[in-house]
Image: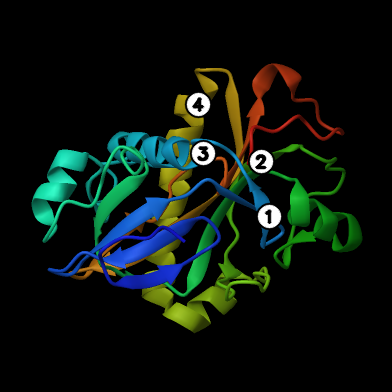
Amino acid sequence: MTNLALDHVYSGKVRDIYDAADNRLLFVATDRISVFDVVLNETVPDKGRVLTAMTAYWLDQLADLAPSHMVSCDPDVINGTLPSAVVDGDLAGRSMLVRKADMLSVECIVRGYITGSAWAEYRKEGTMHGTKLPTGLVESDKLPEPIFTPSTKAELGEHDVNISFEEAAGIIGSDLAERARDLSLTAYQRASEHAAARGIIIADTKFELGLIDGELCLCDEVLTPDSSRFWPADAWEPGTTPPSYDK
């Protein structure tokens, strides 16, 4: 865990979170890596800086779609906000000052291609998150249109469980589930088009959404290799497992 002169709130698989006062938090993205929800002893140097930079980039690209919890990634701004300067050279680039949000208790996943757990379910049942899909799809096929496929939000060390939209609505309410679905699909479509123009396929991604002053906001990491499957477009071939830019 990162050791800062702030009250420690929580540590996830990658991020350490601290109380930054005034209803704000300091996120520190470490270089830890996890595989199937298990944190490994090995680290990837500067991984946390890459995750933070990518999140800041995508939040800027999607700013017209929804607000976010981001306040700043600038060390000078962060240190000027905190009671004492804590973001030094080692933490610069991996620290993000954010507003607190009431986080939705479901993961907002969008799939544009069938792979991973969705492919495993389709092979067995012909469905994805319980919804019937067209017959004849092969691994890594592009779906007729992107699909919102929520999951539960498991505790650290446990696994998320794929659920239907109706089950998600039962957890967070129908209105909020519809708003989350619409924002997630729109953000995925925007990001996919942006990435495709640069030779990258975003096969799927997971958004973390929360409410700040009643507004639905993009929170936590956004469109990083830890939350998304990125494939090189020139290596994608339906029926195979493309090489993936992840971890």
Q: Earlier in the sequence, mark 3 or mark 1?
A: 1
Residue 195: image tag: 4
Give the residue at the far right of this rendering.
124
Element marked by disc 2? strand
Element marked by disc 3? helix
The residue that disc 2 covers is 144
The residue that disc 3 covers is 47
Of residues 128 and 203, the one nearer the viewer is 203
Image vertical order of residue 86 relative to residue 156, above or below: above
Q: Earlier in the sequence, mark 4 or mark 3?
A: 3
* Amino acid at the residue labelled 2: Pro
Element marked by disc 1? strand
Marks 4 and 3, Cα distance to the nearest angstrom?
20 Å
Marks 3 and 1, Cα distance to the nearest angstrom?
14 Å
Can you see residue 149? Answer: yes
* Amino acid at the residue labelled 1: Leu
Marks 3 and 2, Cα distance to the nearest angstrom?
34 Å
Identify the image quadrant of residue 142. Answer: top right
Position in image of residue 70 (x %, y %): 25, 51
Q: Quadrant of the C terminus?
A: top right
The residue that disc 1 covers is 40
Can you see residue 103? Answer: no
Of residues 157 and 215, the one nearer the viewer is 157
Q: Dot 3: within a 10 Å radius of its alpha carbon, few (fewer than 14), some, or many (20 or more) residues?
A: some
**For residue 172, side relative to residue 214 (left or right):** right
Q: Dot 4: within a 10 Å radius of its alpha carbon, few (fewer than 14), some, or many (20 or more) residues?
A: some
Q: Which residue is at a point 25% across and 66% down the rendered structure image?
A: 6
Q: Nearer the viewer, mark 4 or mark 2?
A: 4
Q: Dot 2: within a 10 Å radius of its alpha carbon, few (fewer than 14), some, or many (20 or more) residues?
A: few
Q: Earlier in the sequence, mark 4 or mark 2?
A: 2
